[in-house]
Image: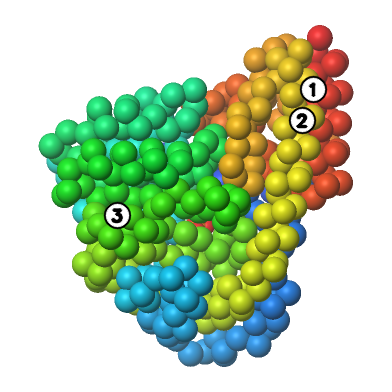
Amino acid sequence: MTSKPTPKPWIKAIHAYVPGKAHADDGRELVKLSANENPLGCSPAAMAALATAKSPAGYPDPDASDLRAAIGALHGIDPARIVCGTGSDELLNLAAQAYAGPGDEVLFSNFSFAVYDIAARRCGATPVIAADKDYGTDVDALIGAVTDKTRVVFVANPNNPTGSFLPASQIARLHAALPGDVLFVLDQAYAEYLSGNEDDGGIALAGSHANVLVTRTFSKIYGLAGERIGWATGHPDIIASLNRIRGPFNVTNHGQAAALAAIGDQAFVAASRDHNAVELRRFVDAVERLGNHGLRALPSKGNFLLVLFEGSLSAEKAYNALAEGGYATRWLPGAGLPHCLRITIGTTEHMDHVARILREQAEAAQ
Ligand code: PMP
């Protein structure tokens, strides 16, 4: 008998991340409202930077120095407290790997971002899921689930896939209740969609405490998901730990150039935020008008809406009808949300069309 390598049992136990699809089962290309991408694309300045970025023959700056300086200047952070990653996914994984291992617990809320479970398991730690409150993050449940084995706590704020948001007072309360030797990872992938007065205080917390790491991304409002650029800020000791284990050239020449240019175009960021606010509001209204058919929208602070189907029209049927009509959305049975679709806020035209399909389906299902 030939022998073969055996993956670690905790690796075998991982369910691989299932991304939203871009094609119907018959191969037709769909409008993608399944991955929370920016329907306006990215800044023209970022497009121009991509066209003129350094030759791919040379390795990128391993420290992404110019990009870190620009991020620091925009957010008022010392660049020594910033690390860039291959998307914020890489940084979430590195945080778990650096601070948790076999026998340790990694804590997060029910219905939070799918990568936390993978990040915990891949370093051999045990994922612990705290109960949600009405689909949102429940600070008391998280605090109650902390044990002496807890090493890392992940909170997405705003949260994906539910869109829920904890204000600064709740984030501060959670942080204050955590033992100092627990790393609190606050994932702010959607923070730029918040309006000015909604800051959850995470960056300030990361600047003043030794156990807080805030992660951000260029994949969402900056419209650069395809270039894979994220960043994180925290105490220099945390940043040093992540730097020890990250890939040495983890952000490409093109990614660094595009992100740098994108940071310089805050008008594009503001336009994207405004577009999202208007279209999210309109889409919530459209879903609420279908309340008598059992459709319900959870309050969302992101660039997506979680729609609950609690009447005759099932989420699965709506998902298939939307795909038939040309739209990929995210049906979430694997995340314990078989009665829900997560729908990214797209262009005005696409949201009108999606709302129309939902209305027709809801009326037909009566
Ligand atoms: N955190 C959350 C909450 C997300 O929804 C996503 C993207 N789906 C990420 C992190 C990772 O994004 P990226 O790796 O593209 O930065």
* Residue drawn at point x = 56 percent, y = 38 percent: 163
Which of the two labelled residues, at mark 3 and mark 1, occupies the earlier sequence position? 3
Q: Is residue 166 visible?
A: yes
Residue tagged by mark 2?
285
Q: Residues within 10 Å of mark 1 (few under 14, many from 20)?
A: few
How many numbered marks, from 0 up? 3
Q: For residue 255, which quarter of the picture?
A: bottom right
List x then y, in percent, for residue 273: 67, 55
| Residue lying farthest to the top in this orientation | 366
Label 3 and label 1: CA atoms lie apart by 41 Å
Could you say whether the residue bearing mark 2 is in a helix, strand or loop?
helix
User: CB of mark 2 within 8 Å of CB of mark 1?
Assistant: yes
Residue tagged by mark 1?
289
- Quadrant occupied by the C terminus: top right
Label 2 and label 3: CA atoms lie apart by 37 Å
User: CB of mark 3 within 8 Å of CB of mark 1?
Assistant: no
Could you say whether the residue bearing mark 1 is in a helix, strand or loop?
loop
Residue kind at label 3, given as amino acid type: Val
List x then y, in percent, for residue 356: 86, 31
Is 209 situated left or right of 285 in this image?
Answer: left
Q: Is residue 2 visible?
A: no
Q: Is residue 362 above or below residue 142?
A: above
Could you say whether the residue bearing mark 3 is in a helix, strand or loop?
strand
Is 343 situated left or right of 55 in this image?
Answer: right
* Residue drawn at point x = 64 percent, y = 69 percent: 266
Residue kind at label 1, given as amino acid type: Arg
List x then y, in percent, for residue 133: 44, 24
- Tell me the number on the disc at residue 212: 3
Which of the two labelled residues, at mark 2 and mark 3, occupies the earlier sequence position? 3
List x then y, in percent, for residue 351: 80, 41
